[in-house]
Image: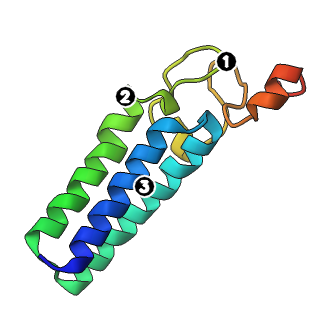
Amino acid sequence: MDRMFYLEWGFWMVTAIILSGVRQEHAVWIWRLFTVLVGVDLVVSCFLGREWWNFGMILLMLLYSFGYLPFRSRQSVCPHCGHRLFYKPLIGNRCPDCRASFMADSQMERLGHCK
């Protein structure tokens, strides 16, 4: 295994750990960025003809992004009504049930400035 494999693996793991511990609006942006970067990494790895373990790592991260986060994480739950949003945070900023923005700053929300 080359050094790039270990650097990528470390980057993906640190990103996944950070994703589990930040506020809702930041976690959604990190989830979006994470998904785009994994997709770009898959395309680049296909063009470079990297080893099979690199593809295995990328597929694990895609599974995490599209299999775990939409169904089990708190990033895919509306903080206002508690409705599970599944893949909606990847493409939108509002809950389809209560129409509230799940990207609103929690401080503004507490003060009553966001609806």
Q: Amino acid at mark 1?
A: His
Evaluate whether residue 42 shows in this view: no
Which comes before the other along the chain, label 2 or label 3?
A: 3
The residue type indicated by label 2 comes to: Phe
Specify whether 95 is left or right of 11: right
Q: Is residue 57 above or below residue 101?
A: below
Q: Is residue 101 above or below residue 90?
A: above
Q: Position of residue 6 (x, y in %)?
A: 24, 69
Residue 20 quadrant: top left
Residue of label 1: 80
Q: Residue furthest top?
A: 81
* Amino acid, disc 3: Thr
6 left or right of 73 in image: left
Residue linked to disc 3: 35
18 relative to 11, above or below: above
Residue position for label 2 = 71
Q: CA distance from mark 3 to mark 1?
A: 25 Å
